[in-house]
Amino acid sequence: MQHNKVLILDFGSQYTQLIARRVRELNIYCEIHPFNKIPSDSESFKAVILSGSPNSVRGEDVLHPDLETIRGKKPMLAVCYGAQYLAHFSGGEVAESNTREYGRANLAFIKSDEDFFENIHEGSQVWMSHSDTIKQLPTNGVLLASTSDVTNAAYRIEGEQTYAIQFHPEVYHTTDGHQLLQNFLVKIAAVEQDWTPNAFVEETVQDLKEKLGDDKVVLGLSGGVDSSVAAMLLHKAIGKNLYCIFVNNGLLRKNEFKDVLHQYEGMGLNVKGVDASARFLNALKGLSDPEQKRKAIGAEFIAVFDDEAHLIQDVKWLAQGTIYPDVIESVSATGGPSATIKSHHNVGGLPDYMKLSVVEPLRALFKDEVRRVGASMNMDSQLLGRHPFPGPGLAIRILGDLTEEKVRILQEVDAIFINNLRSWNLYDKVWQAGAMLLPVNSVGVMGDERTYEKCVALRAVESTDGMTADWVNLPYEFLQKTSNEIINKVKGVNRVVYDISSKPPATIEWE
């Protein structure tokens, strides 16, 4: 099935991925491409959105897209930088703003009888984020909306299906952003809303059948959402020709290896559990630097995975749970064709000598879409709702060097924290939670005795994508009960603290 597609040209805005997610929420398929790498099949896209940018159209670092095959030929929505670009280079004027145009504002004027603003009323809140402003509309520009400080907040160009706005419809603070995008894409551009989880499953399974045939595929399961959903799609397509390997690196949560393995077997997957915890702990002996720990874990995982893959005859494919943000971040929007933000090729870090072709069934999906696809396949809601867990596991939550005793302590602490979040119905209100074992001993008193034992920090954050995060205001009663339980039940811990740092400046993990 050929879906209607929407092209999003990325000029480097921090919100570009959010635009794509909002479009996908309308059940419309879209792709993000750098502004200077417009796809050769641009005619296959039914509408185009220009993103914002940290750059200025008045500066020396202007980002010039080639809109020859787009403007006037396809419906186009220009957001912030895009709106200013169209004005500045098409007969209008853009100047530095006299007032700070950042944060919440309200539409004070909306032109009547415009499809673009259907079901949106004066007073509607929008989110501004720019230092330049459009002083004069481009040639044939028609004013559509204003705020009290920004006269030209929205306009269209007469004779074209070109619309432009100086606010961000994709962010939560723009209350009618969803409606605006729907008006543009569905009413004006006539894009069909046919991108659904069920359609994705049906099409992906068919594609995998055609691509893989009778070939054998190996997949490293982590217990997380992405690898689990990828496994189910492949299982539907090739059944027992999918060989899943679930490695216990000794740094998982308490009982996780046994519990997750049992869960996978209940899903009908062909899974082999490999307990390599002794190998990993041995490889980590004496290491305290976070990067050295990560590298040691990565190298050991490759060695274990390679050993296990060699036991399967004639494997031709390596399956990975790569998702769309990984693909997008492999290409920089503003640094030219060769610049990258971070490399995600062979995300699992497997070396070339394994000589396996890579198959990535989720590479078109965002994380929230992965969960919806999993739900459409009736996967367990507890598995789909699992918090993200770092690849190196508890190794980067134990600050300093690792020992079996430290792992035991942190597993016990973490289990109490997570179990209490579940029993207090707080788990699903938190994006990620965990405990850190600090390289600090502190004085305490238990009974009549003086103790000198470990300190642990609890961390719970709310986020949508992990790029930014706020600490969660957990109830004092919950923290009190959890702290008491940890200190009373976990031998070796006499102090519990709660991390109230947001990201940025702090990261979610401590290492």
Image: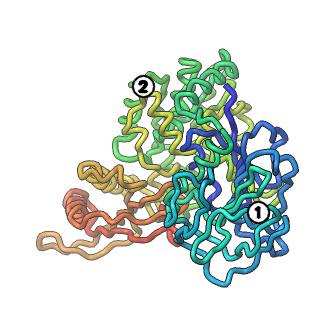
Q: Percent x, y for residue 40?
A: 85, 41
Query: How many residues crowd mark 1 within 10 Å: few (<14), some (14–19), many (20+)?
Result: many
Q: In this rendered view, identify the residue nearer to me: 2 or 303.
A: 2
- Which residue shows up at 48% across the image and 63% down it? 469
Q: Secondary structure at mark 2?
A: loop
- Determine the image quadrant of residue 310: top right
Q: In this rendered view, identify the residue nearer to me: 106 or 270.
A: 106
- Which residue shows up at 68% across the image and 53% down it? 329
Q: Is residue 6 above or below residue 357?
A: below
Q: Percent x, y for residue 66?
A: 86, 54
Amino acid beneath label 2: Met
- Whether tag 1 and tag 2 are in contact, CB under 8 A, the answer is no
Q: Residue furthest top?
A: 214
**Mark 1 against mark 2, which lies toward the viewer?**
1
Q: Percent x, y for residue 71?
A: 82, 51
Say whether residue 327 is left or right of residue 397: right
**Which numbered marker is on residue 267?**
2
Q: Is residue 89 above or below residue 412?
A: below
Amino acid beneath label 1: Gly
Is residue 187 among the parts visible in the rendering?
yes
Say whether residue 223 is left or right of residue 321: left
Image quadrant containing the N terminus: top right
Residue denoted by label 1: 141
Q: In this rendered view, identify the residue nearer to me: 365 or 29.
A: 29
Q: In this rendered view, identify the residue nearer to me: 309 or 137.
A: 137
- Determine the image quadrant of residue 455: bottom left
The Cα atoms of the two marked residues, 1 and 2, are separated by 57 Å
Q: Residue furthest left?
A: 448
